Every structure is written in structure tokens, then in C-alpha cells.
Image: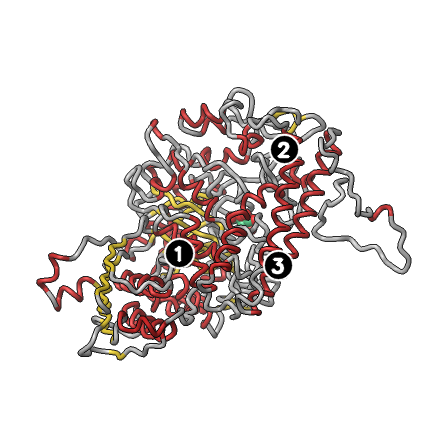
Amino acid sequence: EDGLNAWLRYARVPSASHHLGKLPSAVVTLNATQGLPVHTAGKELVDGINGLFGKKLTVGKSKGTSATVGTVGAYVDKNPSAAAGLPDLIEDGFYLKVSKGNVLILGQNERGALYGAFHYLSVIAQGNVSDFTLTSNPDAPIRWVNQWDNMQDGGTHGSVERGYGGDSIFFWDGYIRDDLTRAGQYARLLASIGINAVVANNVNANASILTPENMDGLARIADAFRPYGVQLGVSLNFAAPQLLGGLDSFDPLDKTVINWWQGIADTLYKRIPDMAGYLVKANSEGQPGPMTYNRTLADGANLFARTLQPHGGIILFRAFVYDHRSLNQTLDWKADRANAAADYFDGLDNKFEDNVAIQIKYGPIDFQVREPVSPLFAHLRKTGATVELQITQEYLGQQAHVVYLAPMWKELLDFDLRADSKPSTLKDIVAGKRFGQKLTGYAGVVNVGTNSTWLGSHLAMSNLYAYGKLAWDPELTSEGILKEWTTLTFGQDKVVHDVINKISMQSWPAYEDYSGNLGIQTLTDILLGHYGPNPGSQDGNPWGQWTRADDDTIGMDRTVWNGTGYAGQYPPEIAAMYENIETTPDNLLLWFHHVPYTQKLKSGKTVIQHFYDAHYRGSATAQTFVTLWRKLKGRIDKERYEHVLFRLVYQAGHSLVWRDSVNQFYFNKSGIPDELGRVGNHKYRIEAEAMELKGYKSYKVSPFEAASGFH
Ligand code: BDP
């Protein structure tokens, strides 16, 4: 159990032999072509039923029961009279009918047929072999994964930016790997949760991805994905015409530049006719973009969009646009990086080509433990939006801490932005239901690596699973998704379920409690690894994330009347809520307001006492994870038991570092003692400064973690 098959282990279900009569005996694929999803579906059904129940299916028509899988079109060709009884399916949707061992699996397209097969296998893997009928359509058409894989890193290998599960499964030494077995295995996992495209290279794109040799390599990645209906997307470097093409400009309105990009699109599509399209990060964090030439972001996006149109491709253009160097926030208290996206896209909504969607991070800053939903989602009415979620836990413990993210995503997706004072939940906006755009959906930053666990941690895989499931159907519950994942990953033991449920469901609140609560953001070191605690680094840094803490007050005033004006970017009802301290929820208080440490919360506690208490509460919860997990000894395989235990013990310890570091820091600043006398009173701790050790050398710890609180 090294994790490689994740939730697709097809491990034998309890009492398997009792169910054999309710399972098909043969598999029939309709118009299957080797290397395409319907063929794959047939193979998965054979492997799955064999693994789960020990029943070997024959392939092709038989006298007994059978599982028939194919597209609606292929089925109706053979059975014209059946057409009337079939439901309406949209792209990628499927229909499933299970009746006394006969199974009919029909997809609107080949991919849908494969999704239907995976769905059926997941149902029976959970021990349910009863008859049922299901019509399932995806909530949104774009359900992509973004990998932040580098082509090359220091000239040696392909690393993964913000990846914690090993090197790139795609790249090595500046080229595409020869052996792409893992790419195929990855596509299999993704197809089973409804993901339909993967952008393989980092948004901070290396122009060399577009050399002829590497474009051949990209075609090999697309070949590895194709049997699973996963399309390939490519991240572009805006300056590639200059960096790679030798042109003297990359101005998006320059004819030679346009022709250069058209040549690239034509060449790529010649090699990969079913390529999904592009992802572009421009004018952000030092990346080149159209603004270099005083062109608009729409000029930049449309350049690529037009070159893709003849080929049917789309472009996801990122809204993560800000210039950290021009934000001199040390001097200008009105400057606010949170304002950047809506400001930059102002007036551009109707300027984009039809095959452009704007990819927006869920919050306006950067994947923090809590952010309000980005107001830009309410601004784009004509151009479609995708919400960018982060499965890789960059600021959220980097897979060394368990943080089950579905509850956070659900809160964001359910948030109602009240555009035009009408119901406008984020999930309805990104499904295109609220404003009616066609190109909408989800993009998840995943960052798997060569580690057999994919993400570096077995438990972190519930996040990948939940991402796909919610992108397909955001009405699913966090606990329901977790239960399904746990059964598929660890089996049906009730104790195992209880433990994983408890740990997972408490994990995000606990992490928020010990890493940054009341909307202050994750108080991590901001310039380096985004990992350990370093509240001091939040102030006065050029990247524009501020706690704005001094000796008496804390929080960022983002009101219109007195602050950076950010609250005013929301539709009026929401703007009014955030503008006022009284109506701002406590968990976002310090995001929107600058208040004294003695400010009373709705709970009656002061801000500073809440800080102290929450850090103690969160880290105390993390201690219980270890005790809980130990109950599973002997109930799951040793390999995964030990692997998870090791991480949980580490998390328990690191949560104490977080607790003491943050509490001590604000105690030192405010001078306000903890009512319970805990902060600054570490009975069993000896400060390094107080030690005298012989035979040791001092060593500079990097990244620095401010456990004793003095910067
Ligand atoms: C930040 C990451 C950085 C990414 C950037 C992005 O720290 O590595 O390049 O976001 O999303 O969160 O472009």
C-alpha cells in the first residue's frame, strides 16, 4: 500500500462472494478504439470487478448478464427504439442503469462513458450492488488541473513549484521525460473524479516548452492522457516570441508577434489535435505581459484566443495580476494588493474573445487559510470565470499538516455575492448559471510528484478527490465525499472511518486557529517558503500582505470610508456588510478592519484574548490527531499507518511552534497578558538564549521560524 493507486485500489470488498450474482458476467464496449476512453472503460470494468469481487468478466457478448458501455450515439445506432427512453445529457455527462446484474453505461461522449464506468465501480466498491438508475451531468464544463511543474531547475531536473511530493512526473533536465507511465496513471486518477484537462507546466512558464523537440514531448504527454479523456493544456510565457523566437518584441498587437504565436498554435495542434488550450499568467510577480507595451489584459488574452479559434482551443487567462514592485505600501496605507484584480479587469468584461475564461483565485490575495471570496466574480458578467482552488497546501502546511479542504471550498462556493441584490453564489457563477456564460468552471493547482503517494501524504489525497467531486457537483457534502474516499482508500472499518472523519473535519478549523485567525491570514513567513510561523514578516514587505500590527492595534482597514476601499469592490449588500465592524463576521474582522487589541468580538472576548485562546485550542486539537490515529494500529496496513503517524506527530509538534511563536509575538507587541497566564510562561521550555552549550556550533536556521517571538 504505497498509495500509487490512491482511491482506485480495487481492493476486495467484504463478503465479495455473496454478491457475484448481482454483477455482470461480461463486458461489451460499443465502437471501442484502443487508446480512447470507451476502450479504457471496458478495461477498468474488467480489472475493477476482478479486484473488488474476484469475478473474471468475459469480453464481448455473452448469454448471461453484461455491462454495456459506450456513447449514447453508438448505442442508439444499434438500438434506435431505445432513444426515446434516454435522458438528456450535456457534454461529459453519463447515464447509468443497473438492473439484476445488467449494467448500461452511456456517455454523452467517450469521456462521459468512462466517467460512468468509474462511477459504477465506485458504487460497487462501497459494497452497494443494488439496482439503481442515475443521470449525472457536470455542473461546469471546465474542470482542469494546473500542475506547477518546471521544465528545468538549475539545469538538473524538473522540480515542482510549491510541490511537496517529489519531482515532476512530466519533465526532466529541460525535456519531457521518456517514461511517461506516471502521467498515464495520473490521468486515470483524474478521470475517475471527472477532471478533463491538465496544464502540465508551471504558470511561471519557461519559453523552452515551445521548442520543436519539447512540442514533440508534449504530444507524448497528450498520448498518455488520451485513453482517459484528459486533455493537455500548456502554460505560456508571454515573452516567448522574444526569448525563443528571436523577435525584438512581444507586443500583442504587433503583426510579427501575432504570426509567431499563430505558428505555435498551428504546430501544437498538428501534433495534438485535441489539445485543450492555454493557461497564461501575465504581468504578475515579474512575469511579462501586455502591459509592458501599454496594452490591456484583454489585448493579451485575445492574442492567444484568436490563434486557438481555428483549432477549437480555449484560454484560461489568470486574474492574479499585480505588480509587487509598484506597491509601496510602507508609505501608502491606501495601497492594497487585494484591490489589484478587480482594478486591472475594470472595463474589460466585454472585451474578451468568446474562447477566453478568466481564472480567479478564490480570494483576492493568495490561497490564505481564510479569505473572502474575490469580488471579481461579481464583475465579470459576459466573460466566464473559473475559480482557482489550491489542492497543494502551499500556505496550509505543505502536506506535512493534515488540512482537509473541502469544508473551506464549500464555504467559498456557497458564499452569496448578491450581485444586483439577487442570489449569486460562487458555485452558480462558476457554473455559468448566474450570468449565463458558456466557459466557466474550476481550476485546481495540484502539484503531484514522483512520490508514490503523489502528494507526499496519504491523507492529502482526500483533497484531490474532493476537488474533482465538487467541480462535478458542488452540492455534495464534505463529509459525504470524505466517507466515499475513505472507503475506497482504506476500506469499510467503522473505527477507521470515525478516526479519519474526526481528524479531517477538525483539521481546517484547527489550522486556522493556530496559524492565523480572525481573518489575519496565515501568519507564515511571507517571502520564503510560506511554511512556518513568522508574523513579523507580514509587515512592511513589498508583496503587500500586511497585518498592520503595532503596539496597540492590528488588522487591515479595507473600508471605503477610511481604508483601502477594497470593501467597495463588492456588490452593495456585501460591501455594506464588510464596511461595518458590527456586521463583519468575526472570522474576517482583521481582514477588513484595523482595531485595538482590546476590541470586543461578538463572543465578548477581546481580539488578543481570542488570539491566545484560539492558538491554544487549535494546537490542542492537533495533539489529539496522534491519539486518534493510534487507534488504527492493526486496522489498516502498516505502511500507510506509519507514514501518516509520522506526519501527525510532526504536525502536533509544529502546531506548538505555531502557537508559541504567534502568541509570544503579539504578547511582546501589545504587552497585554493572557488571562489564563499561559503566554510567555513556558514551564518546560528553555530558551536557546539561556543555554550555554559546549561542543556545539551555532547554525542559521532557514527558513527562520520565530518560536520565541523576538523577530
Ligand atoms: C503564489 C505562489 C507562487 C505562484 C503564484 C501564482 O507562491 O509560487 O507562482 O502564487 O499563483 O501563491 O502565480
Image quadrant assignment for residue 183: bottom left
Relative to 552, 562 lies left or right: left
Judging by the rendered image, the residue that carries numbered circle 3 is: 647
Could you say which is closer to the camera, residue 426 or residue 658? Answer: 658
Could you say which is closer to the camera, residue 623 or residue 240? Answer: 623
Q: Which residue appears farthest toward the left when viewing the image?
A: 81
- Callout in the foreground (3, 1): 3
The numbered mark at residue 610 is 2
Find the distance from the CA under tag 3 to the CA under tag 1.
49 Å
**Above or below 27: residue 134:** above
N-term-proximal mark, 3 vs 2:
2
Q: Amino acid at mark 1?
A: Trp
Q: Name the quadrant of the C terminus.
A: top right
**Above or below 457: residue 639:** below
Q: How is the image coloured?
A: secondary structure
Residue 147 % position (x, y): 48, 57
User: For disc 2, does the CB lie below 8 Å from ligand 1?
Assistant: no
Callout 3: few (<14), some (14-19), or many (20+) C-alpha neighbours within 10 Å? some
Relative to 292, 231 lies left or right: left
Find the distance from the CA under tag 1 to the CA under tag 2.
57 Å
**Above or below 577: residue 284:** below
Judging by the rendered image, the residue that carries numbered circle 1 is: 260
**Element under disc 2:** helix
Residue 453 % position (x, y): 53, 65
